[in-house]
Each structure stands twice: as C-alpha cells, then as structure tokens.
Image: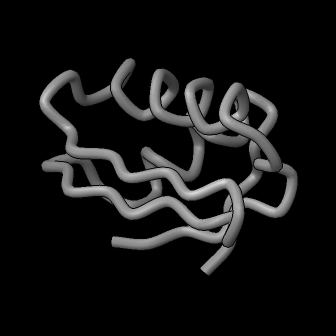
Amino acid sequence: MQFHIENMTCGGCANSVTKAIQSVDGQAKVDADPVRRTVTVESSQPRDALIAVLEEAGYPASK
C-alpha cells in the first residue's frame, strides 16, 4: 500500500515515518521517499492502523 505524507520532507522525517509504522508491525517493509513525499509499505496490518499510527506520530497520511 502507498501513502502520501505531505510533511515528510527530509531523511529524518522518513526515519520517523518508518519507525512509526514498524512500531505496529515490526516485520513491515517500508520504503519512504521524502523527495516524492510517499511511503510504500508491505505490512500485515490494516491500512487504517497504519494511518492512525502515522497521524499519532505527526505525519498524517492520505491516499
């Protein structure tokens, strides 16, 4: 699944996004691209759970 995260603008943001996702699924494969402001995730968790944890971390996701 893919998300657009408007305020993910640097490598530090990408690391925070990755850590947030892996906090709910330690086995998740996360590819965060701060240039495009997208993150692609392979996870067993439902999309809503990932959106919720990203919002909680200060990186609201859309798409």
27 relative to 1, above or below: above
Residue 3 pos. (x, y %): 54, 68
Q: Is residue 15 left or right of residue 59?
A: left
Q: Quadrant of the C terminus?
A: bottom right
Q: Of 28 and 14, which appears nearest the observer? A: 14
Residue 26 pos. (x, y %): 21, 22
Q: Of 51 and 18, which appears nearest the observer? A: 18
Q: Is residue 20 left or right of residue 35?
A: left
Quarter-of-image position of residue 5: bottom right
Name the outermost residue toward the bottom: 63
3 relative to 30, above or below: below
Q: Of 33 and 54, which appears nearest the observer? A: 33
Residue 29 pos. (x, y %): 21, 44
Residue 46 pos. (x, y %): 29, 56
Q: Is residue 11 left or right of residue 50?
A: right
Q: Residue at x 65, y 70 (%)?
A: 4
* Number of on-image labels: 0
Q: Residue at x 62, y 25 (%)?
A: 16
**Figure colour scheme:** one colour
59 relative to 20, above or below: below
Q: Residue at x 56, y 27 (%)?
A: 15
Q: Residue at x 76, y 51 (%)?
A: 60
Q: Quadrant of the N terminus?
A: bottom left
Q: Is residue 29 left or right of residue 32?
A: left
Quarter-of-image position of residue 36: bottom right
